[in-house]
Image (cartoon, rainbow, N blue to C red):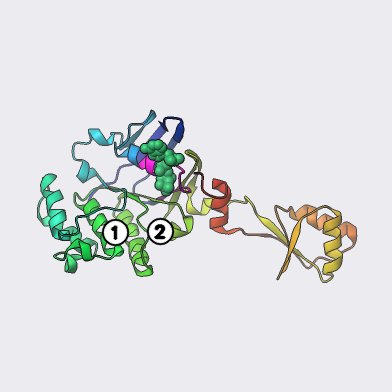
Amino acid sequence: MPTGVPIEVTGLTKRFGGVTAVDDLSFTVEPGRVTGFLGPNGAGKTTTLRSLLGLVRPTEGTATFGGTAYRDLTQPLATVGAALEAASFHPGRTARNHLAVYATAAGLPKARVQAVLEQVGIAQYADRRVGGYSLGMRQRLGLAYTLLGDPGVLVLDEPINGLDPEGIKWIRGFLRSLAADGRTVLVSSHLLSEVQQSVDEVIIIARGKLVHTGSLASVDTDAGHSVVVDSPDRPALASALQAAGLAFTEGRTGFIVADGDTGRIGHIAFVAGVEVSALHRQKSGLEDSFLALVGGGDAA
Ligand SMILES: Nc1ncnc2c1ncn2[C@@H]1O[C@H](COP(=O)(O)OP(=O)(O)OP(=O)(O)O)[C@@H](O)[C@H]1O
């Protein structure tokens, strides 16, 4: 059974000319968990992953696997499996042929090819040309490649992007099983909703900086929460809220006051002599909390 090691990023900065793609970023990814690496387009996810894999040289800081930089690993494929861009495979060659070439180049036993084809569920298509593969089958082939060396660490860039519902369901279970084996699994995405059913932990970045790290549940912050308030006499409540200078919209269950404070709203109604039938915070949901954390959208 492969043993996962932690991924450690410490003070990582990468500047491309005048553009700071990654800005003093530090985080740790633990084995045995699926960790989502999240941020809007242009946040610096790919640059971070490329730094981890020795594909770009950091301006400052370090990125290591169990304390060792990727380029210093003695058996890279057996330590880290990585799928960065949507993998490009020669359309005229078969999946088995592709994997056999990589296995031979890395000095891995030929038996690994059949093993990973079965692991990702494409063994029955292994002798077909990749040119005829669906996007989902290509994604599985990319995953098969990352698993060739039976690594303890998986680094996957947007592995769910473009999959159909069946493929999404499959990959969610697959990521979980990899982590359950004790592997370290890091999965990037620009959408929290895309990975929220797969991840235990999240690392959220925006504009190259860390904005949040913790359990998935910890994302559900109070940021941007609204207050719902209702009364049997809505016109009187509306007047009281207006007089207090509060902005609100009328919803099915009452008035929704953006960024409201339940204590203050209760007091306003009390002073105006308006009966209140409902007064509570409105949960904004994970995706809204995520958008509040990253500043509402793309950083690019
Ligand atoms: N080779 C490069 N030269 C110049 N600028 C770059 C280079 N690579 C990335 N950048 C810039 O660095 C910033 C971060 O890009 P990066 O691709 O890491 O973000 P991302 O979070 O992966 O976004 P996406 O999901 O869109 O790929 C962007 O402003 C991008 O334009």
- Which segment did they paint magenta? 36-49
Secondary structure at badge 1 equals helix
Q: Is residue 72 magenta?
A: no
Residue at x-position 38% and y-position 28%: 59
Instruction: Answer above or below: position of 22 versus 287.
Output: above
The alpha-carbon separation of the residues under discs 1 and 2 comes to 17 Å
> Which residue reaches farthest top?
60
Tell me residue 105's x, y (percent).
12, 45
Residue 202 circle label: none
Q: Is residue 194 left or right of residue 92?
A: right
- Which disc is residue 198 wearing? 2
Q: Nearer the viewer, residue 276 or 171?
A: 171
Reply above or below: 109 against 230.
above
Asked if residue 269 can be seen in this view, the reply is no
Reading the image, the residue beneath label 1 is 139
| Residue type (three-letter) at the residue carrying disc 1 | Gln
Does 187 appear above or below 278? Answer: above
Residue plotted at (55% across, 51% down): 291
Question: What percent of the width, then of the height, locates residue 236?
Answer: 87, 65
Q: Quadrant of ligand 1?
A: top left
Looking at the image, is mark 1 or mark 2 earlier in the sequence? 1
Closer to the camera: disc 1 or disc 2?
1
Q: Amino acid at mark 2?
A: Ser
